Image (spheres, coloured by chain):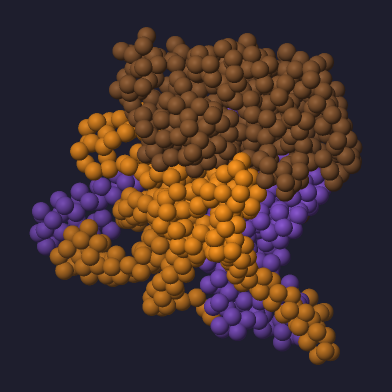
Amino acid sequence: MEFAVGDAVRAASPATLQRTGSQAVLRVLTGLAALASFMIIFLMLFFLVAYAYPAIRFNGLSFFISPIWNIGNQYGSGTVTRAGFTGEAGAAFGALVFIFGSAITALLTMFVAVPLSLMVALSLVYRVPRAIRPLANALVELMAGVPSVVYGLWGMVVLVPWIGQALAPWVTTHLGFIPFLGGSAGSGNGLAASVFILSLMVIPIMVATTRDVILAQSNSLFEASMALGSTSWQAMTRAVLPSVRNGIIASVLLAFGRALGETMAVLMVCGAAINAFPQNVFSPVNTIAAVIVSQLESALTDSSGMAQRSLAELACILFIITLLVNIIARGIMRGADRRAGQGQSG
Amino acid sequence: MRKTLALALAALLLVSAGGRALAATDLLETGSTLLYPLMNLWVAAYQQAHNDVQITTQGTGSGTGISQAISGVAQIGASDAYMADMQMKNTPMLNIPLAISAQQVNYNVQGLNAVHLNLSGPVLAAIYSGEIQYWDDSKIKALNGKYASKLPHQQIVPIHRADGSGDTFIFTQYLTKSTPSWASGPGYGTTISWPSVGTAVGATGNPGMVQTCQNTPGSIAYVGVSFLNQTNKAGLGYAALQNQAGKFVLPTNETVAAAAHALDAKTPADERISLIFAPGDNSYPIINYEYAIVNPKQPDAGKAAELKKFLGWALETSGGQQPRFLDAVHFLPLPESIAARSKAQVAKIQ
Amino acid sequence: MQGRVKVASVMTGTAPKTWASRTWWTLSVACLVAVIGVLFSIFAFVIARGIPALKPAIFVTSTQGVAGGLLNAITGTFTLVFVGLIIVVAIGLGTAIWTVEFAPKWGKRVIRFMVDVLVGIPSIVVGYFLYVALVEIAGWGFSLIAGSLSLAIFMLPYVVRAADVALTNVPAALKEGAVALGARPAMVVSSINLPYALPGILTGILVATGIGLGETAPLIYTAGWSNYLPKLALTHSPVGYLTYVVWTYIQQPFEASHQLAYAAAALLMIFVFLTNLLARSFVEYKLGKNRAR
């Protein structure tokens, strides 16, 4: 880009006051923008907690221990009051099923996706021929951009029937002796489908980051390890990977956060379990994110408003957990960057 | 490049929105998936004659219909369920019956989808609470002597609605009125706390119920009668339900009409009444009024006027109550007296 | 790399270990093939069912009930993303400029950290927050502004990050030269920083667009749905969008609805692919420029 000296000279003005004025204006305007960016998270958190406060008091600890989600009897008479806040008669909000569902889907997804991502990243860096490398990288990045509803669509039309009619019956019949693989084959909507889809969604994230941190690592570690007599695989796993461990851990955490927060794709394949825990990997399951969507309309019929606020309480929990996971992940990444001498210019 | 893109987009918006933005009134109808197919037929026909109003229809569940009508987001909240007393006290709305509909119980059992199994309220309650877990349970066999040997030892997958649903409302009312243990337990509502059954699946909307039932061998689901054609095409069976007189009846125009006649005289002025479990030998036990939940005090006068015109048309025997609309969805037209009461409620909209 | 592997293992005579190593590497390639294979099948599935459904008619009609066309959804999606981008570019560029030019060291760290954390917020949390705050409490109803705001929250970090990096990389010499010649700060920013950083910023905008195109959960509760084209109204007027069609219409028991859902999914994939491609070509262009320097 040409340095437009002419423009600069024309614009030069001797008055210091003008310079200060426009600088102040620019500083203030952009400062406001930065403030807005900074405040978004706090604003959301504060608002949600304030809105959910009645529910937090009303539900108390049983919110985290009870598996029964009951918005009460809209067609009954009477209300129930706890801690000074009222809900409909019979209302008792227990989110254990959803918290458990979120945890188990995210954990199983990591269990499946982390090894896969590592393998894929390693093969992308070391095995894919140079000619195809840009194409392979582009494909992986394209995967990350696919909207979650499209994953959900494929899940509903292809994956769920396949699991329900082919995979699950076979597994429950032939591998039923393994715990959690036996029992009812279910409808295909359930834990297995959710984990499968979530894995597809988090693999690109982890692959991209892992690949980047491995590439950023110099080759010397690899070559030194090889010179000392290890095979290329050993050199990779025992020398290079541990040195980029922090970057990988950070990317795993980020992917975990993503898996926890994913809404639409899970909503379309999870089976919307309520008041019941999954009995095997093919049972219906429900996550916090999915249940907020599927229960919001019902919650709106609660004239006491307590159901809506309890959903807000769920949203708070999800928000806080994903925030914590993200903050830890970013913290690790910055630490790793600083240590590797590649910290962002301050 | 961005400038030209922006200009092009602005031009497109102006051209397409400009003409209509000035003239047309927007109405939003949202809610019951049971009423949705009929609403689409109605709107398509109505808009051919009246193109100064744009009616958007949505099938989102009765719960959404009620809540969005209350909050004013939608002008018409379609619901299979009338509003509760407590809701009426907080926000008095008009519950306007538009037609009479029914609900069938579909199942997907190999070899038995072409015949009609007999099922009763207590048996259904037991299935949905997990007491009956297999299709060859003695209680099911007791009701179906003819097919007792054909019932497989297959786990039952009870499918319920995950969203706030009028279908849930009428189905659970049937269970409540026929089974005391269900009445004192989960009770009825557009959303209930379903008993903990490991295999139970939640589906969204009537279409979701149909699809899940189709994909799950051994499943049972409650589906609105406007989807009877779809369930038949999907090869699902539907049950003969036991009514108050103890007889097992299928959902036909005659049985639905019988149930309606037994109870329509009892319809109060505000038209909130349950038609479930009607007396009579030939009465089908799960029928209901399809309600339009409307706020009598509309904030927008123009929308109020268009709203009254549309609802009035829907209630006319020469308008929405024609067989060509109702037969396609297996609904029944409102009896004269009820239609008159509905029109009186429509007149209250301002 | 491969040559080195073979030489090293031959030199040190690690034959049995080589067999294990080769197995692991083969396994890694198998994983790559499997993952790309599944992606391909998803892609092929959407294209195979979507392309036939992309009849010219659907581009000129709106959805009517459970069938019709996609005009309202396409226009709605682009309108929502466009208005969202306006918000995001204003706030995001401002944030980046402040961070690079005016912020103290701790300010830079804090802003960059917060913006990064913004990436991980679950979409339903944003959607629910805006539903309660804007649609209900503020009384705006389902509206263009609520929908655009929800998209803006998701798109912001990508634009801020890209602008931040791009602006940071403006050579100091250029800026100092301008200031030495007496240019006002606003002039420096507009005639030096921004033009130089433009490709990077545009890349960020394109990436953000890709994100915005694919969001569903927040829009369900902020933009609602409409069977009609977006009105020139910021509030009280719901807007249709493509992702809603994919989510809802596949659940209808009508073949015509399924066709629309596939068509919408295919369109979404095509748009995402195009923005991805454009973004990459900008990166290439900028890299090429830098190399040429």
Viewer-nearest residue: C284 or B224: B224
How many callouts does the rendering have? 0
Colour purple, chain: C
Viewer-nearest residue: B207 or B261: B261
**Residue A163: x, y in percent?**
37, 33
Colour chain B appears in: brown
- Residue shown at 40% from the left, 62% from the top: A253
Viewer-nearest residue: A305 or A288: A305
**Residue A236: x, y in percent?**
26, 62
Location of residue B204 with respect to B324 vertically, above or below? below
Give the left or right position of residue B86, taking residue A279 as reference.
right
Give the left or right position of residue A97, taking residue C3 as reference.
right
Give the left or right position of residue C255, taking residue A94 as reference.
right
Location of residue C268 with respect to A311 vertically, above or below? above
Colour orange, chain: A
Location of residue B29 with respect to A122 vertically, above or below? above
**Residue C48: x, y in percent?**
51, 29
Give the left or right position of residue A319, taking residue A1 as reference.
left
Examine the rendering and report whether any part of residue C229 can be seen: no
**Residue B296: x, y in percent?**
82, 40
- Residue shown at 60% from the left, 84% from the top: C104
Examine the rendering and report whether any part of residue B194 can be seen: yes
Which of the 4 image quarters holds residue C40? top left
